[in-house]
Image (cartoon, coloured by chain):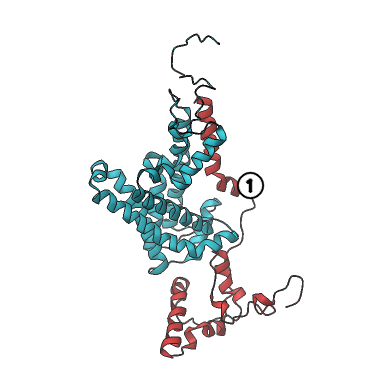
Amino acid sequence: MTELNILSTIFASLSYMVIALFLLGVARKIYGYAATPSPLKIPTTPAPVSGGGVVIRMAREVILFESLFKGNKWTWLGGILFHVTFAVVLFRHLRYFTEPVPWLVALVAPVGILAGVGLLGAAAYLFVRRLAVDRVAYISSGADYFALILVGSLALTGLAMKFVFRTDVAMVKDFCMGIVTFSPANMPADPIFILHYLLVLTLGAYFPFSKLMHAGGIFFSPTRAQIDNPREARHVNPWADDVRVDKA
Amino acid sequence: MSKESGMVAAVLFLVLLASPFIYNAFSAPPTHRAELKLPDGGQCVRDTEWMRRNHMKLLMHTRDDVVREGVRLDREGLKGCRSCHPYRGEFCDQCHDYVGMQQECWNCHFYPESKTVINDEDREPGGTP
C-alpha cells in the first residue's frame, strides 16, 4: 500500500467534509419539513381518501411528474428526461463504490453512457428554456441557472472522460472504495477527473442549502401528501387556541 | 406534524442515505483489488500509465486499420497483448471485473482465460474444462 499523496489527502478530507455536510444538512432540512405543522387541510382535489391512496399519488408524482405533465408538456419532457437519465447515471456510478459489482450495475453500464448524453442534452434544453421562454426567464434567478450549469458540467466532464481524456478507472475505483471503506487510497492526478470530482463535491455541499432539496421536500407538500378526509378525521391546527368541541 | 415525527423522519432519512456507509462499517473490508500478473521485464508498446488509460483506443485503432485499411499491426492488437500476457484472467479480467466493465472482445476474439479454462463456454460447474 503506497503512501497517500498530498492531492489525495486533500480530496479525501474534502470528501468526508462534504459527505458529513450533505448527510447532516439533508437530515436537518427533513427535520424542518417534518416538524413544521400544516395549519390547514389542503390536499389538491381530487385527492385520495386513504393513506395508501396518498402513497400511490406520491409515487405517480415522484416517478412520473404527474402534475407537471398536466401543467406543461414541454417542461415535463425536459424534466423527466433530466431526472431519469440522472438516476441511471447515478446508478451506473455504483460500480465505483461496490465490490464485487452487482450484476445489474454492470448490465446498466453501457446504457449509463447513453443516459449521460441524455442528461447533458436535458440540462442544455432546460437551460435554454430558462433563457428563451420569456415568462420563465422573468422568474429565473442565479440559483436556477447555477443548478443546471453544475449538473450539465458534471455530465460534460464525465462524458469527456469516457470519450476523450481517459483516466485510470481502476485507480478511480481504488480511490472511491477507499473513501467509502474509510481507508483512503490515491486518486489519479488527471485534471479532468479532478474537475469532475470537484463538481461532485460542489453538488454535495450545495444540495442541502438549495432548491435541490425539492428531492426531499416533495414528500412533505401538504397539497400532495395530505389525505382527503376532513370530515372523517378532524384536522387540528397545532397553534390554534384550544376550543371546546362538542361531540354530536 | 409534530417535533417527534420530525425527528423520526430525519433519522429515517439519515439512515437511508448513510446506509452504504453503515453497510460497509459492518461488513468485512474489501481486500480485493485488481491484481495484474505482469511478465518479467519487457516493454509494452506504450508506457504503462498511457496503456492504463487508453488501451481501448489503441485496440479500436488497430481494428480499424486491419478491417478498413488492411494494415495488420499484430504488435498493437490482441495478439500483441497475448504475446506477453497469455491469459486474460490474469490480465484484462482483473481490472474489468473490478470496475464492472464488460469486454465485448471475446464475443468474436480468442483469448484464453487461464491455462485450464480456455473460454467462458468451456467452464462447467464441477466439471473439467
Which residue is at the front of the view, B67 or A137?
Answer: A137
Disc 1 marks which amino acid?
Phe
Q: Residues within 10 Å of mark 1 (few under 14, many from 20)?
A: few
Classify B57 as above or below A151: below
| Residue A107 in picture, x, y percent from top left | 55, 63
Total numbered badges shown on the rendered structure: 1
The red chain is B
Res A1 seen here: no
Classify B75 as above or below A52: below
Q: Quadrant of residue A193?
A: bottom left
| Residue A223 in picture, x, y percent from top left | 43, 32
Res A126 seen here: yes
Reading the image, the residue beneath label 1 is B26
Residue located 41% across and 89% down the image: B69
| Residue A241 in picture, x, y percent from top left | 44, 12
| Quarter containing the N terminus of chain A | bottom right
The cyan chain is A
Residue located 38% across and 49% down the image: A76
Residue located 46% across and 66% down the image: A168
| Quarter containing the C terminus of chain A | top right
Secondary structure of residue under mark 1: helix
Classify A230 as above or below A14: above
